[in-house]
Amino acid sequence: MKNNRFATTVLTPALGLLTLFIVVPIIGSFVISLFDYNALRQINDNIFLGFDNYIRLFKDPVFKKSLTNTLVFVFVTVTINISLTLILSQFISLFQTLF
C-alpha cells in the first residue's frame, strides 16, 4: 500500500502536465476542426460543419498525393535506418577497436 501511494504521488504531477499540454490541445484542435473556424470572428459566429472538412480533405488530390509521399518516405527511411543500424551493430567491436 505504501508503494502505491508513493507511485501515485510521484506520477500525478507528470500525468497532470501531460494531460494539460498534450491531451487538452489535441482534443481542442479536433473540436475546432469540426467548425468553419476563423479566429477573427466571435465564438458564436463560427459555423458547425461536422465532418465536412474531413470529407473535403480526403477528396483533395493534393492531400492524397502528399499523404502518399509522406508515408512512403517514412517507411523507406525507417526501413533503411533500422537495416543500417542492425548491420553496423554487428561491427561494433571493430569500430571500437579502430577508434
Image: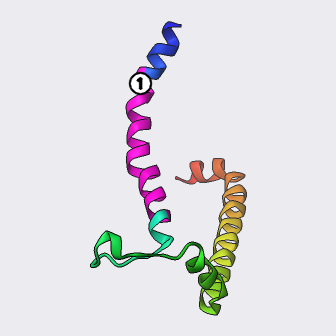
- Judge by depth and name the residue closer to the eye, 17 or 45: 45
Q: Residue drawn at (40%, 37%), measured in percent from left and top?
A: 16
Percent across and percent down for residue 47 are 44, 77
Q: Residue drawn at (51%, 12%), measured in percent from left and top?
A: 3
Q: Residue drawn at (64%, 77%), measured in percent from left and top?
A: 73
Residue furthest front as drawn: 44
Residue 56 in which image quadrant: bottom right
Name the residue that disc number 1 marks.
10
Could you tell me what secondary structure mostly forms the magenta stretch?
Answer: helix
The image's colouring method is: rainbow
Count residues near mark 1 (Cα–Cα under 10 Å), then give few for <14, some for 14-19, many for 20+.
few
On whether residue 17 falls in the magenta region, the answer is yes
Q: Secondary structure at mark 1?
A: helix
Residue furthest top as drawn: 1
Residue numbers of the magenta segment: 9-30
- Judge by depth and name the residue closer to the eye, 54 or 94: 54
Please indicate whether residue 14 sits to the left or right of residue 60 in the image. left
Percent across and percent down for residue 99 are 52, 52
- Judge by depth and name the residue closer to the eye, 71 or 84: 71
Residue furthest bottom as drawn: 61
Q: Is residue 12 above or below residue 83?
A: above
Percent across and percent down for residue 84 are 68, 63
On whether residue 16 falls in the magenta region, the answer is yes
Percent across and percent down for residue 95 are 60, 53
Please indicate whether residue 56 sits to the left or right of residue 83 in the image. left
Residue 58 in which image quadrant: bottom right
- The amino acid sitting under disc 1 is Val
